[in-house]
Image (tube, rainbow, N blue to C red):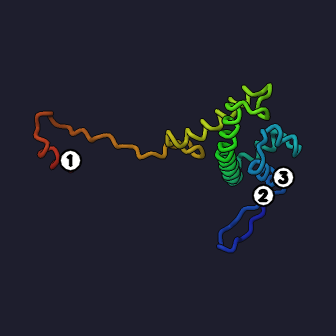
Amino acid sequence: MSIASRQSSGRLRVRFNRQQELFLRQVRDQNLTLQELTLRQRLDDATVSRWLRSAKFKRALGAALKLNEQRRILELKLAAGPAARKLTDLSRGDSVSANANAHVTRLACINVISMVHQEAEHGVDLATKKDKREVAKPPVIPDCYPDVPREEVGEQHA
């Protein structure tokens, strides 16, 4: 059962039941699979499917997922510094860093750093997966013969 209440802004705010609110909070704050979420809350597939038919619940779920993704991206960006430091230690052969798993550690550090650099070098925003660079518009090709002077073409297509 959802209960509606008025916010101070006058907008109608839909409140979800406790199970739904807990589910949304866990999606937002924890990195769990759907199976882990449903097991923790003892939810069956039919209940989750019923919730997903609600447009309001889907909007709230989308917002929770977006916040979770932004947190993961922040975590990756913050991990790039320690990963670079760890790579430096491994390359120097420091005794603390020299262990049996040095190869796996090195690969993990490289992966973290490359994921963060992907955003900077290629202009891909990791949060939205969209290109942040200015995309040049293709030139307008006029529908006239190539031997028409450019000045005349410009007047027709200005």
Q: Earlier in the sequence, mark 2 or mark 1?
A: 2
Of helix, strand and loop, which one carries label 1?
Answer: loop
Query: Crowding near pointer 3: few (<14 within 10 Å), some, many (20+)?
Result: few
Q: Which residue is mark 3?
A: 19
Residue in the image at 50% along x and 43% along y: 123
Of helix, strand and loop, which one carries label 2?
Answer: loop
Q: Is residue 10 above or below residue 139?
A: below
Residue in the image at 76% along x and 61% along y: 15
**Percent from the top left, x then y, of residue 16?**
78, 58
Pick the front one: 4 or 151: 151
Q: Report the quarter where the N terminus lies.
A: bottom right
Q: Tally the numbered discs.
A: 3
Q: Earlier in the sequence, mark 3 or mark 1?
A: 3
Q: Which residue is mark 2?
A: 16
Residue in the image at 67% along x and 35% along y: 87
Q: Does the CB distance between marks 3 and 1 fall below 8 Å?
A: no
In-image side of 17 versus 57 (left or right): right
Q: Is residue 120 above or below residue 87?
A: below
Amino acid carrying label 2: it is Phe
Residue 157: numbered disc: 1
In-image side of 130 versus 40 (left or right): left
**Percent from the top left, x then y, of residue 9?**
65, 73
**Percent from the top left, x then y, of residue 45?**
81, 39
Q: Does the CB distance between marks 2 and 1 fall below 8 Å?
A: no
Residue in the image at 69% along x and 53% along y: 60
Give me the C-alpha separation between circle 2 and circle 1.
55 Å
